[in-house]
Amino acid sequence: MLSKRLMAILACTPSLAMATGVSPYLPLNISPEAELQIERAFVLAGHPSLSKPYKASDLLRILPQLRELNPTLYQQLSQYLSRYRRTEAVTHKSFTLATNDGPAQPLPNQRGQTSDSRFSVESTGFYMFSPYIALAAGTRWDEQQGLSHFGTHLSVGNEYLQLDAGYRDHWWSPMQDSALLLSTHAPNSLSVTLSNASPLSPLGLRYELFISELEDLTLSPEMGTQSHNLIGAHLSFQPLTNLNLGMNRVVHLGANNQAVGIGNTVQALLNTDAHSEPSSYALSSVSARYNHGGDLPVSVYTERARSENDDDSANSMSFGVFLPFVTKDIALRAEYVKQDRNWATPTFFQQGYSNDNLAIGHWADQPVEPSELRVTSVNLSWQHAATVC
């Protein structure tokens, strides 16, 4: 059923034979300066996205609009994007020194990196074998974690059907400080992802499907043993130019000796009755984002989510406002998150909704010792520079 629907959608698009190739991805939670300018550009151009990492093709598509809207930002991003117009490039490199005199804690949204790591080195890049085949690589070495991979994957396909296989990032939320379903807080797991780089139909339809295998999970004794897979589906569309509405569903499979195949994967994604599938744990959400350019650019966004856990359920919600240009150098963001006590606590995994013992969703989640969560974050960014590195 799902494959038939996908083929029907693709049949309504411009000819796939004429489609351009795959797109590399923009940085996600590794380059604050560049990511701020990218967010500013999307708000000015009225491009409200609900998932990350952003594809470079999206930013290249709106770049001409910035020439008149904000010539300085246009110049900065034109220079930054020049690396993505090449067939090969190192897109990011950094060296970090840090000190910490308290207990070691995971750093929010840093793929498992901890606060007691005194130094780290990271780099990302890509190589285009052809317009339709590309290899992306992202690595980090730090004192505590050693060598880890993120944004490392092989991409095959075109602008309407791009397959990524490897350690690809997934962030399904309009929020910047946190994500309820999928974030970069835990280390990336090996996954296969299907998505589109260019919107489908006049409604700007976007889709993303993935399956991944999680690490270091222990089943409750009564549930048996099996592999631990996470599957997900994202769909979003734009009923208005500046408004984007999205739906997400993530299902945690693997208990009761449950085999993972196409049939039960589709069934788990479409099934909204938590009681009928005790060997899976599901989270669903709806999200919305409105970007307004004009004299006072602003982005307003929200997300409402529900978890389905055996005979129990829990709710979570988030809301945010982003002012990209309080002044020409200052941006302001405020976000609020509220979660029920038993959010992200599947009964059959002792570590809860996690990968490598770290929460897959919000960085403040405590899957093993759940508690009601309230988080308010305010971020003031000051940037006074001629270029974006």
Image (spheres, rainbow, N blue to C red):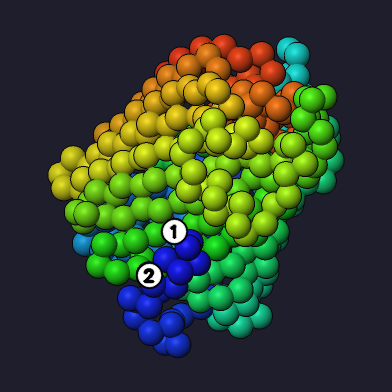
Q: Badge 1 local density, few (<14 within 10 Å), some, or many (20+)?
A: many
> Viewed as shown, does residue 239 lie left or right of 169?
left
**Residue 257 percent across, percent down from the top left:** 77, 41
Q: Amino acid at mark 2?
A: Ile
In front of the other: 133 or 182: 182
In front of the other: 71 or 3: 3
Q: Amino acid at mark 1?
A: Tyr
* Image height of 155 relative to 97, above or below: below
Residue lying at 39% horizontally and 22% vertically, measured from the top left: 336
Please say if the residues under marks 2 and 1 sit with CB atoms less than 8 Å apart: yes
Tell me if residue 328 can be seen. no
**Residue 4 percent across, percent down from the top left:** 46, 69
Q: Badge 2 local density, few (<14 within 10 Å), some, or many (20+)?
A: few
Indicate which disc residue 9 carries. 2
Considering every residue shown, the one lying at the far bottom of the view is 17
Quarter occupied by residue 276: top right
In front of the other: 212 or 66: 212
> Viewed as shown, does residue 371 lie left or right of 305?
right
**Residue 63 percent across, percent down from the top left:** 34, 64
Indicate which disc residue 207 carries. 1
Residue lying at 60% horizontally and 48% vertically, measured from the top left: 231
Residue lying at 28% horizontally and 40% vertically, measured from the top left: 299
> Viewed as shown, does residue 262 lie left or right of 317?
right
* Image height of 253 relative to 198, above or below: above
